[in-house]
Image (spheres, rainbow, N blue to C red):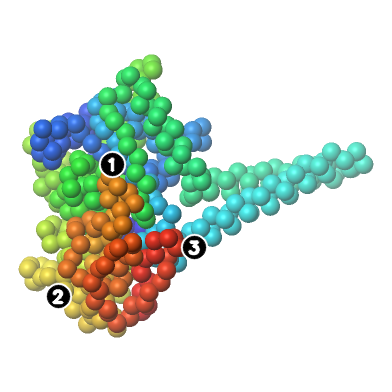
Amino acid sequence: MGVKNGKQILHHVDDLSQDDLVTILRDRATKNRPGDAAPTIALDANWLARKLTSTKLSPAANIFELVKSFGYKGVNSIIVVDGPTRHHSKKSTIERNTSYEQKKLDTILLRRALLQQVEKSRLPELSQKDLVLTKAKIKIIEQAVKSKEKAIRARFLPDDFLERLEEEANRLRQDSGCEGTVKIIQAKTQADLVIERLAVTRIIDGAVASDCDFVVVAGKSMMLIKDFKLGKPLAKNKPKSVHSIVLAAGFKSVLCDAIVKVLKMKEDRIEVADHNLLETDDFMLRAMIAVGLGCDTLPKGVKGWGVVKISSVIKGKPNISADELAVFYEKTSKIPASLYKAFAMAVIFEPANELEVLESSSPIFVHGAPESLPVYLKEFGVGTTIPTNNTAGQETCCGPNKERNHIFAIRI
């Protein structure tokens, strides 16, 4: 879901061309990885599959229209796919899977009803009046089936989504016109964690993603390719063009480097955030701000707190720490500050994939493991021992993935 009020706390620049973006990515690549100037982007596959909903192509093929377009310009792509469960909520995972199965069942029942009406329309003894009514019912049910299937495509991905991506990747690797490489990673939980880790370790130069939480976690390391449009190929046998690109960042300096220093454009091209809440190198404070506004670990946020109120507190105390902000939250709620800290730690110290060895026995954290972890954050793995700090109000809960259980439920 990302962080609420993202539009108010992100700086952005609109309407860039693909050539503009590639120039920016090349500059960032030389700074991120001296000696390896190949620009690299990460793509949030699940978000892209829902954004690019062409009915003529599969979700995987739609994504590779974008990958191919950048590959022809020498940009490497790392496609990251969500895992089978979400790190922050067992309830969220179960509800999502249940909704998917219910919609599939509804579609099957509708198709059954459609078949019954079609068979009825073929009965020789059916009167003309009943035939007209039956044909009208057929049209209504056909529209219902189309609507239900469209909703499934927009919200849920096919079971073979990962395999389809691999097929498209192999096909693109054989394309002599594509200079960029492509790699696919399936996250253990959410793609966000892996992409954030890729940014923090400077393996990527930008991320094709939408949520504000990428910037909350990765800070200055993250430049979001937040939106774009796919156009027609500029020439025969060439990939589709990409235009109307929107870049976003939590730090204005990230966009100044790209727009002013690299592209030599005027600084007024940048749409400045209403509130500069993310302009801090203290990643725990960024996480605590996200908790207050509402994020994956506390979806509704802290009651009575929003962008304006948090901004006012920070302006009144410029060097405020995450723990101090949690105390402010505590004064207006019944939740102890220590539990708000657990929520914030869950935003930042999320277990992410080991970049090469995906099934590591030890969790790899986006910012490295802290000295101690509350129960909320503890991940069980073979041979893994993590010191814990039990906080009142927390309880353990096994996730749907029984082989690698997470303790992530919080009771308030």
Q: Quadrant of residue 190?
A: bottom left
Q: Would residue 101 be seen by someone viewing this image from the given angle?
A: yes
Callout 3 crowding tier (Cα within 10 Å): few <14, some 14–19, many ≥20: few
Residue 170 is situated, as x and y percent measured from the top left of the image, at 40, 29
Question: What is the crowding at mark 1: few (fewer than 14 residues within 10 Å), some, or many (at least 20)?
Answer: many
Q: Nearer the viewer, residue 71 or 399?
A: 399
Res. 98 image quadrant: bottom right
What's the CA distance linking mark 1 and mark 3? 28 Å
Residue at (23% x, 47% y) in the render:
198
State which tag comes first along the sequence, 1 or 2: 1
Q: Residue at x 25, y 74 (%)?
A: 388
Name the mark on residue 132.
Answer: none
Give the CA separation, mark 2 to mark 3: 35 Å
Closer to viewer: mark 1 or mark 2:
1
Type of the residue with mark 2: Glu
> Which residue is under mark 3?
95
In the rendered image, the vertical position of residue 218 relative to residue 49, given as above or below: below
Of circles 2 and 3, which is in front? 3
Q: In the image shown, does 9 or 250 lie closer to the viewer?
A: 250
Residue that carries the numbered disc 1 in the rendered image: 42
Is residue 191 in view from this perspective?
no
- Residue 102 image-quadrant placement: bottom right
Indicate the position of residue 131 as horizontal and vertical percent values.
83, 42
Amino acid beneath label 1: Ala
The structure residue drawn at horizontal position 87% and vertical position 40%, both measured from the top left corner, is 123
The residues tagged by marks 1 and 2 sit, at their Cα atoms, a distance apart of: 35 Å
Marks 2 and 3, the one that precedes in the sequence: 3
The amino acid type of the residue labelled 3 equals Glu
Identified at 21% across, 47% down, the residue is: 199
Q: Which residue is mark 2?
A: 324
